[in-house]
Image (cartoon, rainbow, N blue to C red):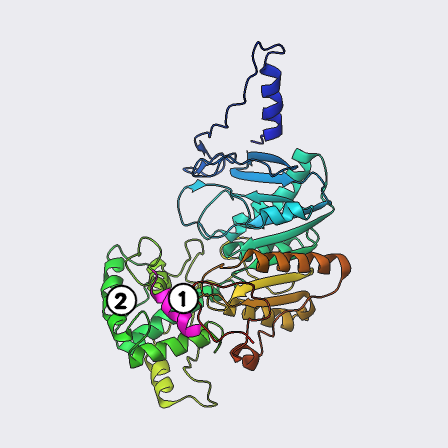
Amino acid sequence: MLRSRAAVVALTALLIPLAAPTPVRAAPPVCDAPVPSTTQPGYLVADPDCDLDGTPFTPLPGARVHTGITAGAAYRIEVPGKWNGGLVVFAHGYRGRGTTVYVDDPGLREHYVARGYAWAASSYATNGYDVGQGVRDSVALIDVFRRVTGARAKSVIMSGASMGGHVTAVAIEEHPRAFAGAMPYCGVLGDTALYDYFLDANVTAAALTGVRIEFPLQPGEDYQARWRSQVGRIVPQLGLPSGSTPAGRTWSAVLERRSGGERPGFDSAFTYWNSLPSLPPLADLPFLFGLYPGLQGGTAGIAPGNIADNRHTVYRSTDRLWPTAQEWRLNRDVLRVRRTAGAGPGLSGVPRVDGRPSVPVLSLHDIGDLFVPFSMEQVYAARAARNGRSGLFVSRAIRGAGHCDFTQAELRQGFDDLTAWVRGGHRPGGDAILDRRAVADPAFGCRWTRGTHQGFVAPACP
């Protein structure tokens, strides 16, 4: 089903009497109840004309909007009055496993319109970690835009946050001719490496505290309760949230190296994330412990098998040339897990990110993010380097502890620098994220950080 808000407004105008006896004020938009999906049994699609809290979606001054539902996905489109011919397709992040899908506005909405760019966003037809569906529905918006506006975009920028960053990275590789540039941020640019990191965090915590755990490929109904009991023995020995015990300090050092290397502000980020509750249904656990891949058999809810692996991982808590005796013990004692499925080509399961962009890519990442860690940028940068594409990737480190915790100034500068790169061919500045010494420098992240970020504590920038 494809419906245009412009068409509804036009039809309403025809039904208003031509000679009304008194002025009639337009009634505020009424939000429709979610409608059954035409493509996903059991799913509902929320009204794209309203936010979930009932706030109507209205155009910014001088702009016009189009909304609708097509192929089981809701969409929003906004075109500025002085359109420059550019279109930004925005991909949202992970929204849990509920069965109602909804579309909302990108964080840079006002900036896009002020710069003359139109934008389009999709709810996707499914929730969960379904990157493939996100790619299909996001790319489809390019044609939807042409149909509902009657105009073809001259150039298209792909952008997305968190899981939407994974969608962005896959979209530009699967459809290299469709896009002129890309701006993922806080993105899962390392595909299954994210789940390796979740595995690393949990198995090393268990090994350092001597708590025996397992990784069931088919967890039974009682496994969540058993995991809660095991975590209940792990956490006190780590001295969380700050890691105040010897085991906790070692775990912090291991986690720092598995999430991007020694860098400023990590101690504050460690405390920040271990003070947060995890995602439902494990919101009673510290954040990272609710993300243990063994809770889902390592499938991410979408893959055909376990996608997490640490068979060849060497865990370090120092940067010495040779592992210490404590590091040897950790690597001896840690639970080893073998993957049975991996990131694959195409859009099924967990789509692979090859790091082979054919267009300019500018990315931003909080260096204290321990949900989607800074190491995702490094994985992508290393892959791009192996493919001879380093010149098409710029990464900017932001001194924040949260996930997708960016100021408008940081995002706006990133977008403006990317679009100038696309137009003029001049590669903008970034950070040397693969240089261990550069990352460990106390001033790392200062160059592109604009404003303060809650929870991040580090020496002041020079």
Q: Is residue 127 above or below residue 388?
A: above
Disc 2: which residue: 231
Q: Secondary structure at mark 1?
A: helix
Disc 1: which residue: 198
Of 395 and 336, nearer the camera is 395
- In the figure, is residue 60 to the left or right of 243? right
Residue at x 36%, y 76% (from the top left corner): 251
Q: Provide the residue span drawn in magenta.
A: 266-276
- In the figure, is residue 86 to the left or right of 271? right
Residue at x 62%, y 9% (from the top left corner): 19
Is 70 magenta? The answer is: no
Q: Is residue 171 above or below residue 462?
A: above
Q: Residue 41: name its quadrant.
A: top left
Q: Position of residue 284 (x, y in %)?
A: 28, 58
Q: Position of residue 415 (x, y in %)?
A: 64, 56
How packed is label 1: few (under 14 Cα within 10 Å), some, or many (20 or more)?
many
Looking at the image, the residue that sits furthest to the right is 424
How packed is label 2: few (under 14 Cα within 10 Å), some, or many (20 or more)?
many
- In the figure, is residue 57 to the left or right of 246? right
Locate the C terminus by quadrant.
bottom right
Of 395 and 176, nearer the camera is 395
What's under tag 2, amino acid-wise? Answer: Val
Q: Position of residue 93 (x, y in %)?
A: 49, 52
